């Protein structure tokens, strides 16, 4: 016997009684259920059956299965009380209905077809393809803004959202649908607005509110292009509100940091960024001057007879070490090892075309010293786990 899907006729039904027909490990099959199984891009309901946590619900053939935390206290033939998590259900109803309306608007305005839908924890996505004969080849910010506004106007119009059930696909052929029905039987058509001129009408197995106003709001976050497809990131309902709230709080925090209101915060942040860039450029120039001075002093300590010259350079990163090395590398015959005993980083350098190969030297030391990194024939970059390992490498180099 098929599982009777009570949620199909009443998406607001949050509890029901049912009879246990089968138990397989931690999964239970009932004669009827108010739990929506995962499908159509929508996650399954969660909740409890006889106060036992329902982890996941899925459909297999004619049956709806409920995966429980435990089935130890249940027996075939028991009459059980099922209760869904209403907050989770209504969240899904808001989001799924928002997706319907937005997909309908994209199709109406730009003949963009929804070819994929995913309802994630942090956002929803739909994948759109533009008709090859469409004058639109890209999805622009103006298009996103137009769609978002129209979707929200439909939401605020509080249009009815009606689910009609049909036994066969032939019964849906004369309906004004966004895309043709692909399944052959047991079809549910969800229509937003009037049947004659709907804001959207499409086959769907999910749960939806009775009126569009219950969605509240929809917010589009961004669009990404992937080959000929455009992925829209968005959310609807309470989650969209939470996103607005989170952004507003962050703007207020940033505004207080820059003594700015929402009207001038961008100008003040840009001014701060420009000043930051100027200071970075000044710092680079100063560091370059310091490196030139240090390199001149270092040349006094260079020993042309040594195979490896080691130089200490604290308070500079590895990029600066390489710049420093380039100032003096042509004045030595062997390797140049520059290190920081504060950050435990170093660079090894040699002149191009010389017999001194940095890669070979580094590889010869790996079995004796613990470090990360490597490089090529004329340069290598190393990071040490401890100062002892750095000191050990310097000692090894001194005996080459």
Image: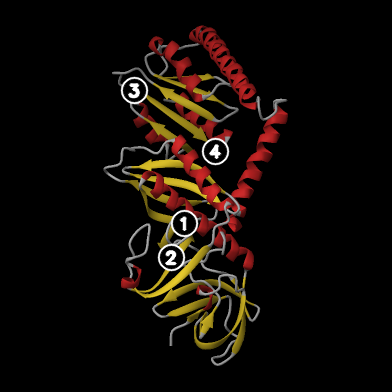
- Circles 1 and 3, Cβ within 8 Å, touching? The answer is no
Which of these two is toward me, 1 or 60? Answer: 1
Gap between marks 2 and 3 measured at Cα: 69 Å
Q: Earlier in the sequence, mark 1 or mark 2?
A: 1
Other-residue count near label 3 (Cα within 10 Å), few / some / many at <14 / 14–19 / ≥20: some
- Circles 1 and 2, Cβ within 8 Å, touching? The answer is yes
Q: Earlier in the sequence, mark 2 or mark 4?
A: 2
Q: Residue furthest left?
A: 133
Other-residue count near label 1 (Cα within 10 Å), few / some / many at <14 / 14–19 / ≥20: many
Q: Which mark is residue 296?
A: none
* Total numbered labels placed on residues in the image: 4
Gap between marks 2 and 4 measured at Cα: 57 Å
From the image, tell me which residue sits under label 4. 385
From the image, tell me which residue sits under label 2. 204
Q: Secondary structure at mark 2?
A: loop
From the image, tell me which residue sits under label 3. 356
Q: Is residue 250 left or right of residue 93?
A: right
Of tags 4 and 3, the one toward the viewer is: 4
Q: Secondary structure at mark 4?
A: loop
Of tags 1 and 3, the one toward the viewer is: 1
**Residue at the spot 57% in from the left edge and 11% down from the top edge:** 286
* Quadrant of the image containing the C terminus: top left
Q: Is residue 333 left or right of residue 93?
A: left
Gap between marks 1 and 3 measured at Cα: 67 Å
* Quadrant of the image containing the N terminus: bottom left
Residue 352 in percent (x, y) is at 32, 18
Which of these two is toward me, 27 or 140? Answer: 140
From the image, tell me which residue sits under label 1. 100
Residue 370, can we see it?
Answer: no
Q: Earlier in the sequence, mark 2 or mark 3?
A: 2
Q: Earlier in the sequence, mark 1 or mark 4?
A: 1
């Amino acid at each position: 016997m098929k599982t009777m899907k009570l949620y199909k006729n009443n998406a607001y039904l949050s509890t029901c009684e049912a009879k246990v027909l089968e138990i397989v490990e931690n999964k239970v099959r009932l004669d009827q259920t108010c739990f929506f199984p995962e499908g159509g891009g929508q996650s399954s309901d969660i909740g409890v059956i006889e106060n036992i946590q329902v982890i996941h619900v899925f459909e297999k053939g004619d049956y709806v299965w409920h995966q429980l935390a435990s089935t130890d206290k249940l027996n075939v033939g028991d009459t059980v009380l099922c209760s869904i998590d209403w907050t989770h259900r209504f969240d899904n109803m808001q989001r799924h209905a928002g997706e319907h309306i937005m997909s309908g608007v994209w199709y109406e305005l730009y003949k963009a077809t929804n070819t994929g839908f995913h309802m994630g924890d942090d956002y929803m996505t739909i994948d759109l393809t533009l008709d090859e004969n469409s004058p639109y080849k890209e999805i622009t910010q103006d298009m996103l803004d137009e769609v978002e506004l129209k979707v929200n106007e439909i939401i605020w119009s509080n249009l009815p959202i009606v689910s009609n059930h049909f036994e066969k696909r032939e019964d849906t052929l004369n309906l004004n649908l966004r895309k043709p029905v692909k399944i052959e039987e047991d079809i549910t058509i969800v229509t937003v607005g009037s049947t004659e001129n709907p804001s959207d009408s499409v086959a769907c197995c999910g749960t939806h509110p009775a009126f569009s106003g219950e969605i509240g709001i929809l917010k589009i976050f961004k669009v990404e292009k992937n080959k000929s497809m455009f992925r829209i990131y968005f959310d609807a309902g309470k989650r969209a509100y939470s996103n607005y709230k989170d952004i507003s709080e962050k703007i207020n925090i940033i505004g207080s940091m820059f003594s700015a209101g929402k009207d001038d915060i961008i100008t003040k942040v840009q001014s701060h960024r420009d000043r930051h860039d100027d200071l970075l450029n000044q710092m680079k120039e100063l560091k370059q001057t310091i490196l030139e001075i240090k390199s001149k002093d270092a040349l006094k300590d260079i020993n042309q007879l040594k195979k490896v010259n080691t130089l200490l350079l604290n308070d500079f990163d590895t990029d600066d070490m390489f710049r420093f090395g380039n100032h003096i590398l042509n004045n030595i015959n062997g390797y140049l090892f520059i290190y920081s005993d504060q950050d435990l980083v170093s660079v090894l350098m040699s002149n191009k075309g010389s017999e001194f190969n940095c890669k070979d030297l580094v590889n010869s030391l790996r079995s004796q010293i613990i470090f990360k990194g490597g490089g090529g024939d004329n340069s290598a970059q190393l990071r040490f786990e401890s100062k002892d390992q750095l000191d050990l490498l310097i000692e090894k180099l001194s005996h080459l």
